[in-house]
Image (cartoon, rainbow, N blue to C red):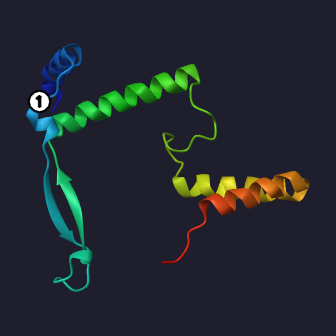
Amino acid sequence: MGSLIPFLARLFDIKMHNGTLSADCKRAVVLPIHKGGDRSLFTNYRPVSLTSMVCKEMEHVIASYLRHVWDKNDWLYEDQHGFSPGYSCEIQVITVCQNIVDSMDKSRQDRRYFNRFLEVFSFSSP
């Protein structure tokens, strides 16, 4: 792999300067992978996309660079979980819910906002 690095770097450089992606980077082969259970039910399968390894590496290089720039310039809010390694959406939801509960303990005004929030995001049964 080490001998390929200069060639991949040159390829990435050309693609970035041209602003183009090859057809290989836009195409994927999707295979159904059995998760378990009855093989005749499509719900027991999950899709897996097979894409070009070169394109995956280019995506990884770009994502790593962006993450470095964001961290260096402190562009992301400290509670931004979507782009932060080691954080998840579940942790974000728990944090927001805890902040709401803490806020409700402090103020009636916040309780009114929370009730409005629940009205807006409530789901009704069909």
Q: Residue 76: x percent and y percent?
A: 57, 31
What amino acid is found at the position of numbered circle 1 in the picture? Answer: Ser
Residue farthest toward the bottom in the current orientation of the protein: 38
| Residue located beneath label 1 in the image | 22
- Density class for disc 1 (Cα within 10 Å; few <14, some 14-19, many ≥20) is few
- Mark yes or no: residue 102 visible: no
Quadrant in the picture for the N terminus: top left
Residue farthest toward the front in the current orientation of the protein: 126
**Quarter occupied by residue 78:** top right
Residue name at image x 17 percent, y 82 percent: 39
Choose between 110 and 119: the one closer to the eye: 119
**Quarter occupied by residue 27:** top left
Looking at the picture, does residue 55 appear above or below residue 48?
above
Q: Residue 88: x percent and y percent?
A: 52, 52
Residue name at image x 24 percent, y 30 percent: 58
Q: Is residue 41 left or right of residue 116?
A: left
